[in-house]
């Protein structure tokens, strides 16, 4: 068993898992979803439908990381600024790159109007029912709702009761099923369709830090499994069990093999890769296939382009913006202490 560590301990395997999740989503989109978006596209002979569940793995990872982040957060402003610097610079770059690439690749039908693009810059489009510049942005709405809910629990000093809260929170999804007239915005803000997967990461973090044992987490995890099985079906229930097993192995120290350099590199690119791969990939696949390129070669070219763009955004936007903005924030927070009385 991995021994409990300080709250700021970071597991490299989490980054590798994030990279695997992103790659799974990419392969799913290129081999399964492309024809649904651009009907003239022909996919490879064998698809990868299970890659659709990579987003659920993302949510579990976020549950682990955000709980860890809040435990070392000193103020609401610190938390908000940390999330802003982590999400927005790369996201803004992805919006601009995606829009430009769609026109360059001759897929302007996938591009959005200037008003929609401007709204997307707020990252609030999902809450106000405005189309997204790229379909994958739907999960950012879920992430923002999760941050808001967890911040509210942190402010209420209720994180130490998170297991009991989640045992009630997860089945709350049944309320929207039984009463479909309830506002859908409420279900978005409470992320009732997805909280069960975030709970896996939260449970794992609490076990890792020695706050709970796995047997203490059974009621919460069982609540998630029952809800997912009844409302999403057996396939998603199996994914739920598999995700929980992955985190159990992680906490037990049995995932060291994930520290392979290629997986760590992929993990570093996971966020920009997730943001830029979908519509750009569809457009490139359509353009190449229209020029006579075989579907497999077109899909591999789209993957190469997505990785290349992700590396550029990571190197030129994500990393430097994190460094500069967070250094400025630290300097600003330290300034009152250095001023003369």
Image: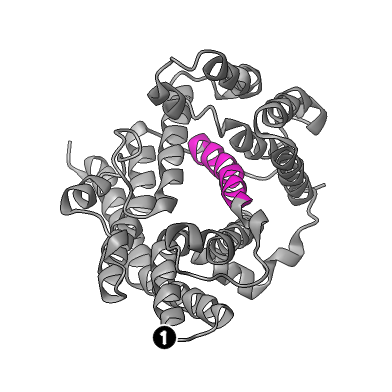
In the displayed structure image, the side of residue 332 where residue 309 appears, left or right: right
* Residue at x-position 56% and y-position 14%: 178
Residue at the image position 35 percent from the left and 38 percent from the top:
126
Circle 1 sits on which residue?
Answer: 291
Q: Which residue is drawn at 41% across and 85% down?
A: 291
Q: Main secondary structure of the magenta part?
A: helix
Location of residue 56 (image quadrant): top right
Q: Does the magenta stretch include residue 59?
A: yes
Quadrant in which the C terminus appears: top left
- Residue 94 in the image: state x and y as whole percent: 33, 62
Span highlighted in magenta in the image: 53-71
How many marks on residues? 1
For the residue pair 247 and 32, the one nearer the viewer reads as: 32
Q: Which residue is drawn at 31% across and 53% down?
A: 133
SS class, disc 1: loop
Question: Residue at the front extreme?
Answer: 40
Q: In this view, does 80 lie above or below 224?
A: below
């Amino acid at each position: 068993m991995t021994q409990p560590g300080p709250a700021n301990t970071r597991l490299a395997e989490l980054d590798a898992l994030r990279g695997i999740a992103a790659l799974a989503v990419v392969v799913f989109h290129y081999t399964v979803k492309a024809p649904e978006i651009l009907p003239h596209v022909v996919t490879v002979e064998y698809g990868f439908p299970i890659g659709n569940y990579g987003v659920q793995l993302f949510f579990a990872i976020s549950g682990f990381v955000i709980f860890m982040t809040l435990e070392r957060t000193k103020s609401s402003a610190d938390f908000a600024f940390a999330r802003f610097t982590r999400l927005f610079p790369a996201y803004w770059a992805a919006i601009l790159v995606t829009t430009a690439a769609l026109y360059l690749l001759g897929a302007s039908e996938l591009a959005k109007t200037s008003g929609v693009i401007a709204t997307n810059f707020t990252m609030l489009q999902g809450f106000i029912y405005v189309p997204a510049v790229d379909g994958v942005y739907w999960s950012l709405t879920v992430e923002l709702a999760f941050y808001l809910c967890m911040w509210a629990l942190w402010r209420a000093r209720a994180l130490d009761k998170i297991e009991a809260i989640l045992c009630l929170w997860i089945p709350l999804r049944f309320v929207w099923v039984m009463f479909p007239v309830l506002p859908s915005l409420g279900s978005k803000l409470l992320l009732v369709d997805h909280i069960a997967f975030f709970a896996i990461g939260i449970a794992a973090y609490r076990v890792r830090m020695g706050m709970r044992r796995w047997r203490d987490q059974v009621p919460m995890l069982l609540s998630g499994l029952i809800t997912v099985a009844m409302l999403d079906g057996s396939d998603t229930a199996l994914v739920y069990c598999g995700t929980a097993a992955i985190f159990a192995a992680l906490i037990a120290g049995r995932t060291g093999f994930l520290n392979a350099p290629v997986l760590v590199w992929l993990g570093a690119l996971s966020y920009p890769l997730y943001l830029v791969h979908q519509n750009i990939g569809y457009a490139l696949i359509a353009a190449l296939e229209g020029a006579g390129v075989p579907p497999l070669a077109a899909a591999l070219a789209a993957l190469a382009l997505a990785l290349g763009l992700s590396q550029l955004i990571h190197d030129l936007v994500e990393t430097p913006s994190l460094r500069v903005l967070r250094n400025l924030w630290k300097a600003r927070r330290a300034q009152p202490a250095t001023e003369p009385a």
